[in-house]
Amino acid sequence: MDKKKKTGIGKLLEIKGMGSSLTAFAGLIVIYFVFGMIDHKVFSAQNNLNLLRSMSKYLLIGIGQSYVMITGNIDLSIGSVVGMGTMISATLMSHGVPTLPAILVTAVAAVVVGILNGFLVGKFKLPPFIATLGTMFVTRGIAFIVNGNRNTDNVASGIGKEAADRFQKFFYYGKTFGVYNTFWIALITFIIFFFILSKTRSGRHIYAIGSNVDAARLSGVDVVKTTIKAYVVSAICSTIVGLILAAQAGMGNMDAGNMYEMYGVAAGVIGGVSPLGGAGLLLGTFGGAGVWQVLENGLNMIGAQIGLQRIVIGVIVVMAVLLDVVIRNGSRTSGLGKKAG
Amino acid sequence: MGNVIVEMEHISKAFSGVQALDDVRLELHEGEVMALLGENGAGKSTLVKILSGVYTRDAGTVRIFGKEYGNLTPNSAREAGVAIIHQELNMCRDLTVCENMFLGREIKGRIALNNAKMEEEAQHYLDELGVDISPRQVVGTLPVSKQQMIEIAKALSIHAKILIMDEPTSALTSKEIEELFRIVRRLKESGCGIIYISHRLEELEHIADSVTIMRDGKFITTGAYKDFTMDTIIEHMVGREIKERFPRVECELGEKVFEVKNLNAGRLVRDINFSLYKGEIVGFAGLMGAGRTETTRAIFGVDPKSSGEILLEGKPIRINSPLDAIRAGIVLAPEDRKKDGLCTKLTIRQNIALPNLDTIGGKSGVLNRAREDELCERAVKELSIKTPSVERDAATLSGGNQQKVVVGKWLVRDSKVVMFDEPTRGIDVGAKVEIYHLMNELKKNGIAVMFVSSELPEVLGIADRIIVMCDGRITGELDARKTTQNEIMRYATMFENKLGKAGSSTEVNDHG
Ligand SMILES: Nc1ncnc2c1ncn2[C@@H]1O[C@H](COP(=O)(O)OP(=O)(O)OP(=O)(O)O)[C@@H](O)[C@H]1O
Ligand SMILES: [Mg+2]
């Protein structure tokens, strides 16, 4: 009501969801330093570069899944779409189709899946869990079939050594300004989708349908279109990751992207995106992806077994959300613990 | 009056920065109906939520039947004999009436739940209320009024000695209200104390023994109802004098803007014909379930139409979705704010902006934050929405202020036809007048205004023309200046005679 001119952090914190986002970043820094203390190699320049690069995959996945979660839905097909993207692009390239057309075809396939998901959920009101479970199997099936149920040959065998090199460098091995391209790709994608979500009409519609579909519809929001948009964003992000994986391996792996949809959920949720919809910032997802990657990296560096890694990560996800819930409930019934009288 | 059964003293409560209650007291006696009054956001709901264990207080003492209670929880409050009917209905929409009534205190057989017994009991209390609901019906399929009655039945079934009703009548028809009052009186005779919160001040004379008035989280005054006049009550509530409760402006009747021809949509919208003209407000009266809400929803494109024509400025238009309607310049502020009106998880600003995003962003779809802030500021100011910041979640607003957001978001855009469904439900006297002023403003600007309302004094006081509906049909069209409540009620109860004879009025109920 009254225009209070708040400065700096106060104003920042007024933005809804900023608290959770900043908490994720704080967690990220703490975890980073804790592991760094245990093993100084964590602080090494090369490790930092690797961190940024592998974080990029989680960030991209997280962006897609966050979009969908903010609409109050979920996308289980992400991992399979990653796999499909890897396989389609690698198959085409290894059969001699030039890089650009191969990427284009891959993107089209992904968008089709996104639209399909959006239609099933938005138009036909299928529970998103079921709809995307279906597309999850179908797209993984496609990933298997495109190259006749086997991983592809080296892409260089089709498009030649030089072109393959360029492709691999562009998505994975090359650096710009001293940082791996993968990170720049993720960052640019992040900035674009961050802008769309926070500053455009479509973004606002995504929050609205996640908060109250009926009220949104009555306010003139096209629910079907908005749902489709969210799923298409998810599919596009997955495809980029698919290409990154293809570039990393230089070939297509049928199982690529397995479980990635869940990593996306984790990144978003750690950063304060509500799986129930209507709330969360992509900035939080950025922090969440960071937390996830720093944890994985740190546990690797100190030589923790894979089983232990899984357990720690599982605990962190639940803790992050628990913390959020406790904080939120605390403010709702403030004075809960205080003794009356 | 009997013994003191509830004593609340020096109660304070703050929500992250908002002092909702500040040193408030309240005293309730056996066999007393106390009206708890105050503007939207005065803290009424917060106070009773403390008594019923929903919120914990920051300071103050609570004594129930002489026993002092520390922190009450919903369960300990229930054991102490307190039952509350919340302002915002809190029911599981997918469960049945019976399941909702016994939620958390299900009756168990030896192994499984004893459904038969629960249904029997549920039926018993529903019968006592005289409502025609089966315990097996799914709550989500029932209209708000029926859901309200279920809450009341639930309170009866736990044999509460202290019954709190937070705006129980805001969604009820006069017949149902009559029924409710009968029950309230009976409970009172049996020694219950009742705290009654309502913005329908006309009701008080029928049931209130005493009043307690709050303003801005503070206790203002209390006393026997007969010692107050309506004017002093209002003055205490709003802290200033309200000259006219139903301000009407006279405008010259202009050309026809909007016309609905032979509209059919389901059982509750049958052969609807009406027109709206510039410079007038049309009120839709009728009993709950008369099809008024359904009519507005069909026009607005929420529910499918089976036939009919809609003409805007003489030209037929197609409306298949709310988006079509809004683009054509027809808007609807819906009735059920929790379900259809508000995105509670979004901020107040985002809620107000939501239907206006087309004007806030250009073609590119990029939102202009300055323009958005300006729109919201206007809505907040014009409707005096009470909040420390528009960046708060809509859920943190008091009930009445939520309603203002639902209405306000439509008023900041240019429309040709504005439909309101129960626009003043749960709004305090002062704010009601503000909404009337806004409706009048629209009328003066040549916008066709129609509103659905179950409050007859409001329909009579604000509308120029009244259309009465009964059971999905329009049964009468009246000049508001010449008609009476009785006449409206006669048309509102003109049920079709299934034997083929012309409709006859059955029972006429009016009050207030
Ligand atoms: N959960 C909450 N979080 C933050 N603020 C709240 C919360 N609940 C209520 N408030 C604030 O406390 C104040 C009192 O609210 P309350 O709901 O008690 O008002 P009320 O008198 O019942 O109004 P109404 O007639 O509109 O229902 C308001 O300013 C409201 O915004
Ligand atoms: Mg209230």
Image (cartoon, rainbow, N blue to C red):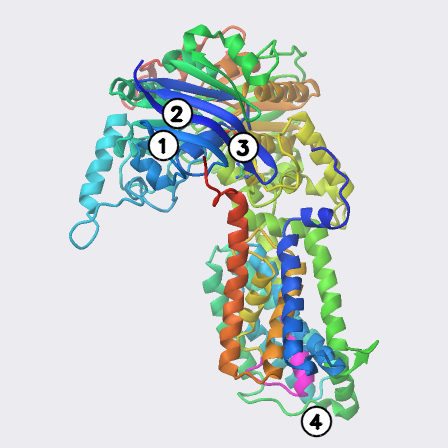
**Residue B53 x/y as whole percent:** 40, 37
Residue at 55% x, 27% y is B217
Q: Is residue B76 left or right of residue A265?
A: left
Which residue does the numbered mark 2 point to in the structure image? B7
**Residue A252 part of the magenta segment:** yes
Q: Secondary structure at mark 2?
A: strand
- Circle 4 — which element? helix
Q: Quadrant of the N terminus of chain A?
A: top right
Q: Which residue of the protein is positioned furthest toward the right in this rendering? A: A177
Q: Is mark 3 within 8 Å of ligand 1?
A: yes
Q: Find disc 4 in the rendering and name its residue.
A: A157
Instruction: Give the foreground label among 2 and 4.
Output: 2
Q: As shown in the figure, which amino acid type bears the numbered disc 4?
A: Ser
Circle on res. B68: 1
Disc 4 residue crowd, few under 14, some 14–19, many 20+, Cα 10 Å:
some
Which numbered disc, 3 or 4, marks the residue closer to the eye? 3
B145 or A103, nearer to the observer: B145
